[in-house]
Image (spheres, grey):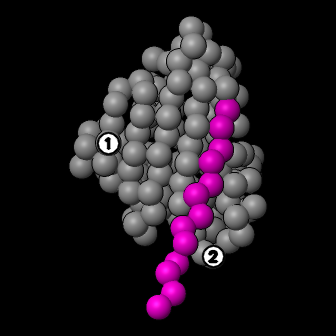
Amino acid sequence: MATQTTTVITVENTVNAPVAKVWDYWNKPEHITQWNHASDDWHSPWAKNDLQVGGRLESRMEAKDGSFGFDFWGIYDVIREHEYIEYTLGDNRKVKVTFTADGNITRVSESFEAESTHSVEMQKGGWQAILDNFKKYTEAS
């Protein structure tokens, strides 16, 4: 009997902001809609976030021209304020996000189980681009 191995992809960035601001910008819907896209021709018109264990996070990601879009959602499994978030996506893949504070600098590391439709490189590039947008938005605000 063959066993399927799970590929875990990690993206990281250093945000020049204190962890309390990084945490808020990561989790508040009014901020999520400003950074949650991989390229400038995409956007997130809405987001909802019930930040508690068993709570649901949701956002809509779509092309600005309306040609394609999808809902992204998951259920929170673990939350440690200003430190760690773990959730399970709708397709049962796991996501883990670590926030490491160092004064006015916060390291954000996001690990997720790859899906089988797109290449690992494509997935990593997309998630890294979103994290890069998060950094840019958070530092500029």
Q: Which element carries disc 2, helix, strand or loop?
A: loop
Residue type at mark 2?
Answer: Thr
Q: Is residue 44 above or below residue 79?
A: below
Magenta stretch: includes residue 16: no
Tell me the crowding category of disc 2: few under 14, some 14 to 19, or many 20 or more residues within 10 angstroms, Cα based. Answer: few
> Which residue range is magenta in the image?
1-13
Q: Residue 133: x percent and y percent? A: 68, 37
Judge by depth and name the residue closer to the eye, 26 or 81.
81
Instruction: Kindly identify the residue that appears in the image at 43 percent across and 69 percent down.
Output: 91
Which residue corresponds to mark 2? 117
- Judge left or right: residue 96 versus residue 80: right
Q: Is residue 68 above or below residue 39?
A: below
Q: Residue 41: x percent and y percent? A: 74, 52
Q: Which element carries disc 1, helix, strand or loop?
A: strand
Judge by depth and name the residue closer to the eye, 114 or 4.
4
Res 109 label: none
Which residue corresponds to mark 1? 78
Q: Residue 105: x percent and y percent? A: 62, 15
Instruction: Kindly identify the residue that appears in the image at 62 percent across and 48 percent down.
Output: 10
Residue type at mark 1?
Answer: Val
Magenta stretch: includes residue 5: yes
Judge by depth and name the residue closer to the eye, 126 or 94.
94
Judge by depth and name the residue closer to the eye, 89 or 35.
89
Tell me the crowding category of disc 1: few under 14, some 14 to 19, or many 20 or more residues within 10 angstroms, Cα based. Answer: some
Q: Quadrant of the C terminus?
A: top right
Q: Is residue 33 above or below residue 88?
A: above
User: Which residue is most to the bottom?
Assistant: 1
The answer to whether residue 64 is visible is no
